Amino acid sequence: MVDLRLKNIKKSYGTVEVIKGIDLDIKHGEFVVFVGPSGCGKSTLLRMIAGLEDISDGDLYIGDKRCNDMQPNERGIAMVFQSYALYPHMTSYENIAFGLTLAKRPKAEIEKKVKEVAGILQMEDLLDRKPAQLSGGQRQRVAIGRAIIRQPDVFLFDEPLSNLDASLRMDMRMEIGKLHADLNATMVYVTHDQVEAMTLADKIVVLNDGYVQQVGTPMELFHNPANKFVAGFIGSPKMNFFEVKIIEVSENTITVDSLDIGAIQLKNKLQFELGQNAILGIRPQHLVRQIKNEETGQITGQVQLVERLGTETIVNVKLKSGAIVIASLNQDIEIARGEALMLGFVSDDLHLFST
Amino acid sequence: MRKKPTSKLRQTTAAGWGMASPAIVLMSLFLIVPFILAFGFSFTNQRLVSPNPTEYVGTSNFSQLLSFDILTIEPKKAESGQLIRDDDGNLTYPRVRKFTRKNPNYPELKGMKEWFSWSSGDDRVVMLAKDVIFIKALVNTVVFVLIVAPVQGGLALLLALLINQKMRFINIFRTIYFMPVVMSIIVVSILWRFIYDGDDGLLNNLLSILSFGYFEPIDWLGRTDTALGSIAAMSIWQAVGFHMVIWLSGLQTIPASLYEVADIEGATKWQKFRYVTWPGLRNTAVLVLIVITMQAFALFSQVNVMTRGGPLDSTQTLVYQAVIRGYEKQDIAGGSAISVILFLIVLSISLFQRYLTREKT
């Protein structure tokens, strides 16, 4: 049972601070996904856990050991790289056996272990091939094999699926999920793809600008984003945001007003003061077509773009103020560009963030 | 409608040839034509300036250069059959030229000279060659290549590994190592003649200081046993920076992630070199070795400036001989024949190196 703990981890290059103090507890067997936009420091954080980057400040514990100054190979980790990082002159077998070869293990033991790993990944027939003779998915499989054979306490994945095409990505994603279930190992996975994050993670860590924005299960993040950044990052299409003003605050409710939506009353979850500006958010999935004014809230505008994805229809609606609202509507909805559209929503689905 | 693009394409082609033509003309004139001429001349008796017409002589230039033979000479015997010894008790032998000059019993040895000899029992075995200077030049060149190719290649790799790290002022080191490459080899040779000077040279002084005066000054370029080595050392120093840069470019094509994997797997520095760096440098290694070998076979300027082939032909080289024969001795045919032999040697070595370092599938 090995937990991973990060205590106020910081990383700076010269005077530029890229990781600005991160605290995180990862339990044994958890699948944790670091997600965030490019340059948010997620890969750097992963590489610091791996020992490929120095930790400028803070403490990293793997199990009970403080690992800040340990060599990568002493940390009990294995890493899978975006570029696969396979040795081009070695066969799949040799690539997987690399660590054991370095450690000068007996040939019979190496063979047994490689065969075992190849069995887990169903790639026995690929062992004699060199990376150049493998497809992207097969290469990634070899790279994962090289990680598994180390029997690490923690698996680290650095955007492992980014170089694969869409359908392969989905297959590999499922396989990694299955692998996690089979091995019951702690996995830390970096991606900028929120679908990967949502589908794989037990726990998502949203990073931006060197800080942890929010930690939680995928559905927690989806339903209760802590701030505008998380709300905008998780969920596709992106959440719609409106600038609003607080016009009334009572014990249980809060009323906001804006040009596009008008006055709306919602439950008071956060501390807001009267007269303050705030951001109101609503997910495209929570908007529905409405024929006539009802008790719920409404937005009206003109349809600008209709994208039919089969499972849903994405509609861009231009409001009076010029703002664009995206709604995810019924797949077979009959709607065309230029039509006027009224969208309704329930106030419970609204999110309110401070600016 | 169809004609227009075709004519335009033709014009473009013409313009392309036009732009390439200066280079084509110059390269033909100074590389391709001489190359073909050298092949042609090597089968004639062409001289630089001669009133006689040039004649085709077949392969006699080559047989003149390459024929050698082994002669076993028995010691002189008195009529009684007793071996004759000189005052020091050594055996005495008939002179080699008794066999090689106008000796009807040994027509095949006509015109040959002694290259070297050794004793075998009481007999003396003599290695004979028709063109001893050429043979010496050939041997010297091969020895030079055998020293320079591994040492220069290895040293260049070592330097490349040293300067391929993130360090302050690393560019200063790169510049220092690369500086000799941009200097003219003539200038470098003249400078190193001073360094190697037998009386007051920098090297002798340095060794003398380092050994607290115990070191006896050596005339580095004036002794048969040190001259070629001295030229090799200087040549290695001069061009090592060039090959360092080639190695460096090879090193930088190896993705950093391959080293990171090795770190995670716990590879030692040596293991990283053995399993990551060296395999990644395979193609670079072929290039570096071929280039060094070809450059080393072309050894000329250093010899021309520093020793002119001496002392006692100990620094004769193929290219130096080709030039001396062609221009000083006006024997264009002989010089061409040497050039052709050099070409064939370098060609076969390149092919062999390619074969050795081929991608094994």
Image: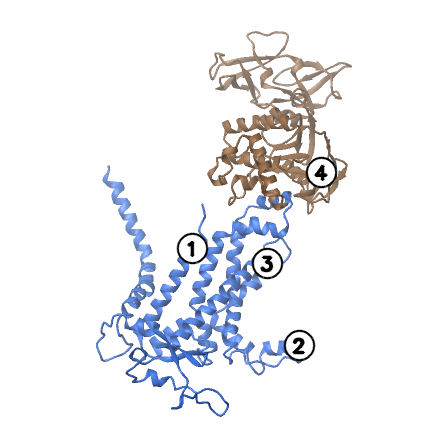
Q: Where is residue A260 drawn, in percent x and y?
A: 60, 18
Q: Which chain is brown?
A: A
Which sits earlier in the primary sequence, circle 1 or circle 2?
Answer: 2
Q: Where is residue B1 drawn, in percent x and y?
A: 24, 37
Q: Secondary structure at mark 2?
A: loop
Q: Which residue is mark 1?
A: B354
User: Is residue A224 something one can see in this rendering?
Assistant: yes
Q: Secondary structure at mark 1?
A: helix
Q: CA distance from mark 1 to mark 2?
A: 45 Å
What numbered label is drawn on residue B211?
2
Please tell me if label 3 and label 2 are on a single chain: yes
What numbered label is drawn on residue A118?
none
Which sits earlier in the primary sequence, circle 3 or circle 2?
Answer: 3
Q: CA distance from mark 2 to mark 4?
A: 58 Å
For label 1, the crowd category at 10 Å Cα-Cα, with few meaning under 14, some 14 to 19 and many 20 or more, is some
Q: CA distance from mark 4 to mark 3?
A: 33 Å
**Nearest to viewer (mark 3 / mark 2):** 2
Please tell me in which quadrant of the rendered image residue A283 appears.
top right
What numbered label is drawn on residue B171?
3
For label 2, the crowd category at 10 Å Cα-Cα, with few meaning under 14, some 14 to 19 and many 20 or more, is few
Q: Chain of mark 2?
A: B
